């Protein structure tokens, strides 16, 4: 991480270096070790800290309170009932969704495909986004919903 920080600082443009402690992604539910790793990344100069796999608000608060640098939370692994307001109050500075939206779209695609294959039906078309809404979402400068 020290080498990465040095390389990032040597760039001729601003660069935000995010450091990840992936313990929870790999089944290592050791919160103390996760915090220790994030603090070590922080000590050498990482700008943002990240530990994918944290799930509940209590654990998130524990991690964030042990850090001085901004913490990123990825919602694809966290309790989906958490809100931006709760996470902000817990000290989370950045919230990302990773591939969650893509996986959500893929789940819808698979439901449609199964309905056609298994039932020979097309009722999913009732839930399509109107063409006008899709076009407007891709117009330069428009405010997509």
Image: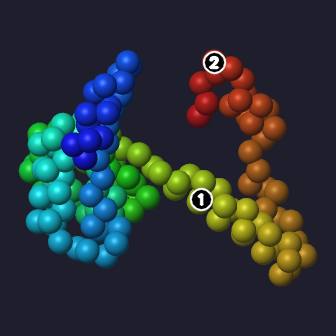
Q: Does the residue at mark 1 contact the one at mark 2 (Cβ under 8 Å)? A: no
* Pointer 2 local density, CA inside 10 Å: few below 14, some 14–19, many at least 20: few
Up-down: is 8 above or below 62? above
Please give the residue where the numbered disc 1 appears in the rendered image. Answer: 104
- Residue nearer the viewer, 96 or 45: 45
Q: Give percent across and percent down for residue 102.
A: 60, 54
Q: On the rendered structure, is 68 left or right of 140?
A: left
Q: Which circle marks residue 113 in the picture?
A: none
Q: Is residue 27 visible?
A: yes
Figure quadrant of the C terminus: top right
Please give the residue where the numbered disc 2 appears in the rendered image. Answer: 141
- Residue nearer the viewer, 92 or 67: 67
Question: Residue, x 45% and y 49% (percent of image)?
Answer: 97
Question: Distance between the Cα atoms at labels 1 and 2?
Answer: 25 Å
* Pointer 1 local density, CA inside 10 Å: few below 14, some 14–19, many at least 20: few
> Residue placed farthest to the right in the image?
120
Q: Give percent across and percent down for residue 50.
A: 29, 50
Rendering quarter of residue 37: bottom left
Rendering quarter of residue 16: top left
Q: Give percent across and percent down for residue 91.
A: 19, 43
Up-down: is 133 above or below 87? above
Q: Give percent across and percent down for residue 140.
A: 68, 20
Find numbered disc 2 in the image and state the secondary structure of the residue it sits on.
Answer: loop
Nearest to N terminus: mark 1 or mark 2: 1
Question: Residue, x 18% and y 52% (percent of image)?
Answer: 38
Q: On the rendered structure, is 12 left or right of 35?
A: right
Question: Residue, x 76% and y 50% (percent of image)?
Answer: 128
Find numbered disc 1 in the image and state the secondary structure of the residue it sits on.
Answer: helix
- Residue nearer the viewer, 118 or 34: 34
């Amino acid at each position: 991480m020290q080498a990465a920080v040095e390389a990032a600082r040597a760039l001729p443009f601003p660069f935000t270096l995010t450091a990840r402690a992936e313990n929870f992604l790999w089944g290592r539910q050791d919160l103390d070790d996760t915090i220790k790793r994030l603090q070590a990344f922080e000590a050498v100069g990482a700008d943002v800290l990240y530990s994918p796999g944290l799930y509940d608000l209590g654990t998130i608060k524990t991690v964030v309170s042990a850090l001085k640098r901004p913490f990123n939370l990825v919602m694809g692994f966290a309790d989906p009932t958490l809100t931006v307001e709760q996470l902000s109050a817990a000290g989370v500075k950045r919230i990302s969704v990773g591939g969650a939206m893509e996986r959500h779209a893929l789940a819808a695609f698979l439901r449609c495909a199964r309905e056609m294959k298994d039932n020979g039906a097309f009722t999913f078309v009732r839930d399509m986004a109107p063409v006008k809404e899709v076009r407007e979402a891709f117009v330069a400068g428009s405010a997509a919903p």
